[in-house]
């Protein structure tokens, strides 16, 4: 009995000693999928992913100024490439984990039609979008309105969020009747979770390729390497797809 107990305690100690924690900076649009992936990752590997959510542009500034992040799961492909070029990202580790989709969304179930024709009407006073200078989904929103020839007529109604999470909150709180957000924020398992929405055709904006990269501070961390491998695996890809992302 004592031997069995000793063996169990030793095994538990080894597992604890091998378990590691990785600090992950995650783009706001990927919040819900990453929470699910991190929980499954910990269950399957014993490693823990400590997640921080926010704008990719802000994360870039924090990383170059010494923030302790070990992986960046970005909202674009340009920031990880830039970090890699500047030596903050580990060469050869960058990959596209998903391609994001833009959606025009409202909490009002009757406001947004299936073709986005609401944008041509006076049925709303405020239109939310993320800052197009720093947020990929904001850039995509401006591209969409430009290609539709609606940008000049809509600019006076803009409510601009610092990032896609704040933009979503503007709509949820009623500060804007509708707005452009990431499909992943309002989509799960094949359907829009609430309100009304128009999934913007991909032909109206440049592809939103979202890359992950191992950062210099995570180069020798087992959990960091393990998480990057896990993000490419079938369990993670299934979760990513369930939130409306296209897989690369």
Image: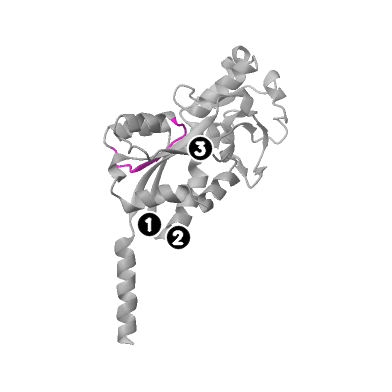
Q: CA distance from mark 3 to mark 2?
A: 24 Å
At x 64%, y 36%, the residue is 107
The answer to whether the residue labelled 3 contacts the one labelled 2, judged by CB atoms less than 8 Å apart, is no
Helix, strand or loop under label 3: helix
Q: Position of residue 179 (x, y in %)?
A: 60, 28
Residue projecting furthest to the top: 152
**How dense is the environment of label 3, judged by Cα within 10 Å: few (below 14), some, or many (20 and up)?**
many
| Residue matched to label 2 | 44
Residue 165: give x, y in percent of width and height: 50, 35
Let me know if residue 65 is in the magenta part.
no
Which region shows up in magenta? 67-77
- Report the Cα–Cα distance between label 2 and label 1: 8 Å
Alpha carbons under labels 3 and 1: distance apart: 23 Å
Disc 3 vs disc 2: which is toward the camera?
2
Upstream in sequence: badge 3 or badge 1: 3
Residue linked to disc 1: 47
Q: In terms of depth relative to the viewer, which is nearer, 30 or 45?
A: 45
Q: Residues within 10 Å of mark 1 (few under 14, many from 20)?
A: many
**Residue 248 in picture, x, y percent from top left:** 54, 39
- Which is nearer the eye, 167 or 19? 19
Prevailing SS of the magenta stretch? loop
Picture disc at residue 29? 3
View extreme (bottom): residue? 1
Mark 1 lies on a secondary structure that is loop
| Closer to the eye: label 3 or 1 | 1
């Amino acid at each position: 009995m004592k031997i069995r107990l000793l063996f169990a305690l030793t095994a538990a100690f080894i597992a604890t000693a091998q378990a590691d924690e990785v600090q992950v900076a995650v783009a706001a649009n990927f919040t819900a999928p990453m929470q699910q992936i991190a929980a499954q990752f910990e269950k399957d590997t014993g490693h823990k992913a400590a997640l921080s959510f926010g704008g990719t542009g802000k994360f870039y500034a924090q990383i170059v100024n010494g923030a302790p992040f070990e992986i960046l799961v970005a909202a674009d492909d340009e920031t990880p490439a830039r970090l890699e070029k500047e030596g903050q990202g580990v060469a050869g580790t960058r990959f596209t984990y998903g391609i994001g989709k833009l959606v025009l969304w409202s909490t009002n179930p009757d406001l947004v039609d299936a073709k986005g024709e609401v944008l041509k009407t006076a049925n709303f006073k405020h239109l939310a979008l993320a800052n197009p200078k720093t947020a990929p989904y904001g850039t995509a929103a401006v591209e969409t309105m430009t290609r539709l020839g609606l940008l000049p007529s809509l600019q006076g109604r803009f409510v601009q969020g610092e990032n896609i999470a704040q933009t979503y909150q503007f709509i949820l709180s009623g500060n804007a009747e509708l707005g452009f957000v990431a499909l992943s924020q309002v989509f799960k398992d094949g359907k829009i979770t609430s309100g009304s929405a128009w999934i913007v055709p991909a032909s109206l904006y440049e592809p939103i390729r979202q890359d992950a990269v191992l950062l210099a501070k995570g180069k020798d961390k087992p959990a960091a390497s393990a998480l990057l491998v896990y993000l490419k695996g079938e369990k993670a890809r299934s979760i990513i797809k369930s939130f409306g992302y296209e897989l690369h």
